[in-house]
Amino acid sequence: MGQIILNQVRKTFGDVEVIPPLDLTINDGEFCVFVGPSGCGKSTLLRLIAGLEDVTSGDISIDGQSATELPPAKRGLAMVFQSYALYPHMSVRKNIAFPLRMAGLPKDEIEKRVTNAASVLNLTDYLDRRPGQLSGGQRQRVAIGRAIVREPAAFLFDEPLSNLDAALRVGMRLEISELHKRLSTTMIYVTHDQVEAMTMADKIVVLRAGNIEQVGSPLELYKAPRNTFVAGFIGSPKMNFIQGEQASALGADTIGIRPEHIDVSDTQGQWSGRVGVSEHLGSDTFIHVHDTGLGDTITVRAAGEVDFKHGDTIHLTPRADQIHKFDAQGLRI
Amino acid sequence: MATQHSRTAARIMMAPAVTLLLGWMLVPLIMTLYFSFKKYLPLRGGDLGWVGFDNYVRFVSSSAFWPSVTATLIIVGGVLLITICFGVLLAILLDQPMWGQGIVRILIIAPFFVMPTVSSLVWKNMFMDPNYGLLSYLWEFFGAEPIQWMSQAALPSIIIIVSWQWLPFATLILLTAIQSLDSEQLEASEMDGASTLRRFWHIILPHLSRAITVVLLIQTIFLLSIFAEIFVTTGGAFGSKTLSYLIFQRVLESQNVGLGSAGGVYAIILANIVAIFLMRIVGKNLDN
Amino acid sequence: MARAVSSRRKSINTALAWGIGLIIFFPILWTILTSFKTEGQAIADPPVFLFFDWTLENYSIVQDRSDYMRYLWNSVIIAGGSTLLGIIIAVPAAWSMAFVPSKRTKDILMWMLSTKMLPAVGVLYPIYLLFIKLGLLDSLFGLVIVLMLINLPIIIWMLYTYFKEIPGEILEAARMDGASLKSEILYVLTPMAIPGIASTILLNVILAWNEAFWTLNLTAAKAGPLTAFIASYSSPEGLFYAKLSAASTMAIAPILILGWFSQKQLVRGLTFGAVK
Ligand SMILES: Nc1ncnc2c1ncn2[C@@H]1O[C@H](COP(=O)(O)OP(=O)(O)OP(=O)(O)O)[C@@H](O)[C@H]1O
Ligand SMILES: [Mg+2]
């Protein structure tokens, strides 16, 4: 239960077409992540699915039923907002119970489900607090609690972690993934953080200006990005793009090589350059290399600690089988 | 966040308010316009037919018209001048550190909550009465001849009463505006060595200009239609008849509805001119 | 500005402000004091401030002579009724404009405000006539309606500015949670806007309580509120300062107290949010 199909869905605000006609199928139980740069229409797409915005044209169906005309309440979806959107005047218990109260469930059933959700989310001790008395992570869990008690056909998340600090974000990421494994309910998750996308998704949808650039599993996107946009968006640090002679030698307009696919040496290599800033992460070191004659700065990732100083000469060798080739339109060859 | 559902709901939910206000505006307005073109004397023959612009001409050419315009301008202008000047000074004073600021604020704001009939009667009898009023004691105390406030100085008396009522409003709004002044800006200018007077002219006053405009316009709208203050004090005598009081007299006292309605149309036009300016300012505020 | 101000300057400020504050407040204070004097002491020469024979008899005379309680009741009904009715009509309208804004929202708000500026005297006779025709003259119901209408723009405007501060996402969350429009407004929006709604009510009760054009012109003996009650003291009969003071004190006391509570909101309400 929870298959969502978008058929030629289009959205305009006034004269501005934010989502050009778009097709997408999200399968039951799938964890689907929408990623893309700010303003590309991720939230809009999610809100169209939620029913908070009308589609301009096209059709959305949920579990085989057309939902295009249904108000949000009738679509059987639950949403977790970026700002959590908790009801500030209600206790945590009341917040979580609210959708059940609206559905007119009997009191003891509500109580049972709230207690259950609270224990799943470690909120039992906070049930009588107001949202204002909770930490960011706890608020996030309440928002999730409010979503899961309804046992929706699918969960919609709009950048749920962006208000949390880095450590908490990693923790919550795991919790949400865990929740997905346990409930195996469809989840649609919006983020502009490609790390979240890579680590959580079964399926990633990369959006740019309302267009779907590529749909696929995280590894498919990593290994075979369909164009330079996806290639640059997925993976961290970003893929290096090289144009000109080196590219045309391989019959491409642009070639791309990920930082982790370049070997470094202080004695010999295919390219050489001067070391700029090195970022030491302990497990890895990111080295920014200038003056390679390849155009832009090249970023490389060396495992562990490496001992290059600012201004040193460094030799780089890309692994030939990991070079991505793109044509003049930026499409993968 | 708008879907067709919510837009439809929004329209339905706005309908009662919009309909009521539309009715409240249009029905009397159209009736006033209608009467203004008629000779209509309810107690002396009723509807005596159409007279074209006769009422408009007669209203303006009556001997009471220009004095009433003058009286209106003097009252509105006088009150505005007093409330804004003192309002600015008081607001600056209240913004200074002091003990018991909250209580002082309460004292100063109090007159605004006094209903106009009460303040007018209290001032007229207990302060401005030539025999027993406190002000005449004060005058006598200093050896001066007590003033016959209501008859000799009707306009200043009304200006004093109305200013007393509106000073709190001006002060409160200007104080709110001052408090929103970025204290860093003031500190910076202090570092730059600006004197107190210069700071007032170049930083505080410009910052207040918007609030002053708002006070000016809102008060103008209310002041143009002051009624109780005249009704219970002079009853329009001794040159204190304002435009709106003149209209009131034409309609209810001399029961010349046609003439009064023509006056009403003038008053509406006047108020609209002021309102347009106010709308501009408020409208700008809506954008942010 | 955490900065030490010389206590000398602070003392001067304090003295000055208290002095001015007391002068401004003095007419009210004097009225209250006089209400406890005998008529003779009320006009004593020189005036007496505190050392007089405190008496409550003026209050009972005023009550007997002009039935204060009835006027008070009328004021309560008119101010309370018109405000309540206004709120009921305004909440849905303000919801619409705050959360489902359209291109025309701003114009509608402006237009609503402009009806507030229609000079009452300009439309007095038509209203008077309509009231006679509809049998509403000197009726509480008629006044409730009129005062509701003249204050409706302010009520809508105030609620609108308060609602604007409530994040739309919370209402959307309620919608996702299956709340109908009614539940959304009743269980989510209204409780969240309680402070704003309360101050709107407060300010409008004050405005309606003190309204002295329609209440004087559309009432006679039956439905007159306190404004009319006081106006009946405008023609003096013998010694009457103490009684006038007692009547005045009774007329303004309830609203003075309410007003002191709502002074912050006053700014926002009366300037239509143009000064915050
Ligand atoms: N109600 C609206 N009216 C007009 N334009 C809108 C509206 N909502 C969104 N847009 C426009 O639609 C585009 C997509 O917005 P959307 O919020 O979906 O972006 P997003 O991908 O979620 O971005 P972010 O990562 O910053 O949240 C933006 O250009 C935005 O300006
Ligand atoms: Mg977004």
Image: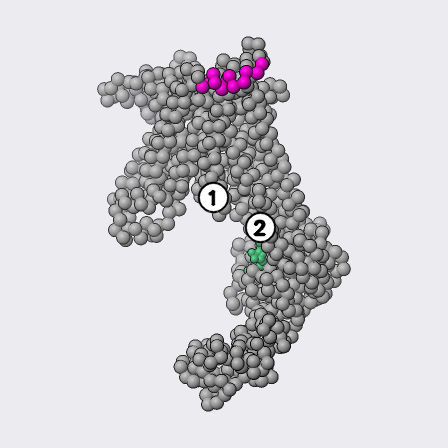
Is the residue marked by circle 2 packed among few (<14), some (14-19), or many (20+) residues within 10 Å? some
Q: Residue at x 59, y 62 (%)?
A: A209
* CA–CA distance in space, label 1 to label 2: 20 Å
Give the residue at mark 1: B285
Residue at the (69%, 51%) spot, across then down: A71
Task: Work out whether disc 1 and disc 2 sit on a shared chain.
Answer: no
The reply to whether the C-beta atoms of the residues labelled 1 and 2 are less than 8 Å apart is: no
Residue under mark 1: which chain is it in? Answer: B
Is the CB atom of the residue marked by disc 2 within 8 angstroms of ligand 1's nearest atom?
A: no
Residue C45: name its quadrant. Answer: top left
Q: Give residue B86's position: percent from left, percent from top.
A: 33, 34
Provide residue C58's location: percent of width, then percent of height.
43, 20
Does the rendering let one see residue A83? yes
Label 1 CB less than 8 angstroms from ligand 1: no
Q: Which chain is disc 2 placed on?
A: C
Residue type beneath disc 2: Gly
What residue did someone put label 2 on?
A: C168
Residue B6 rendering spot, x and y as whole percentages: 65, 46
| Residue at 71% in and 49% down | A104
Q: Nearer the viewer, residue B108 or A233?
A: A233
Q: Helix, strand or loop at disc 1? A: helix
Quarter of the figure that contains the C terminus of chain A = bottom right
Magenta stretch, residue numbers: B49-60
Colour setting: one colour
| Label 2: which secondary element | helix
A243 or B282: nearer the viewer:
A243
